[in-house]
Amino acid sequence: NNPDGSILYRTSGGAVKTFTKEDTGVVNTVIGVIRMVYIESYKALAELYSKSELNKSIFEYKMVHRFIRCNFGSNDLLKYDIENGIFNVEEVQCPLRGECIFEKIICKPRKVSELTKREDEVARLYASGLSLQEIADNLGITYSTVNVQLRLIRIRLNLRDCKQIIKLFRE
């Protein structure tokens, strides 16, 4: 976050860039996590920017921009704000702290940490040693859906990698 309201970001190994509505890959990735993990925040953001809803790219860009401004501070070089799909939400400087109606909804939102029934099934099968293709065949879903489910499991449970899924579900 910059004092002028702009946001700078850098992907792994890339150069620092200013976040704009043209950064659709970043928007799609972040909005997907907000939608699945920060459900209350997603609903509040959708309502807040509902006038832009007909233009999906602008609508989602505004939602992501606000979420980032409210939850990721200035570049501190100590830890990444988003690392391996996990959001490291922090309290940012805000003149409305304590009186904003979106505190604990958009700003420092609560995370949905419970797995869906399907995510639980995928995690248990993965921990049992099945390959991604075997899990897909067993559950009648695609390989890519299994991949997405494992990513969401890691995000919801704040796990760094899939090895931690195996450890958690084998215990």
Image: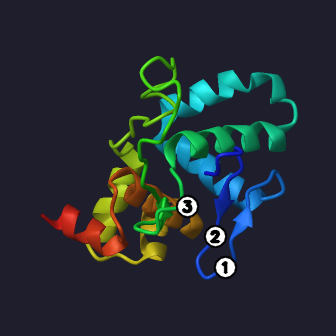
Q: Earlier in the sequence, mark 3 or mark 1?
A: 1
Q: Where 92 sits versus 162, above or below?
A: above
Q: Amino acid at mark 1?
A: Gly
Horizontal side of 12 relative to 153 (left or right) equals right
Q: Nearer the viewer, mark 2 or mark 3?
A: 2
Q: Label 2 belongs to which residue?
A: 10
Q: Position of residue 123 (x, y in %)?
A: 33, 61
Q: Residue at position x 33%, y 52% from top?
A: 120
Which secondary structure lies at badge 2? loop
Contact between labelled residues 2 and 1, with CB atoms less than 8 Å apart? yes
Q: Where 104 sits versus 99, above or below?
A: below
Q: Label 1 belongs to which residue?
A: 14
Q: Residue at position x 63%, y 70% from top?
A: 10
Which secondary structure lies at badge 1? loop
Q: Label 3 belongs to which residue?
A: 145
Which secondary structure lies at badge 3? helix
> Disc 2 versus disc 3: distance between alpha carbons?
27 Å
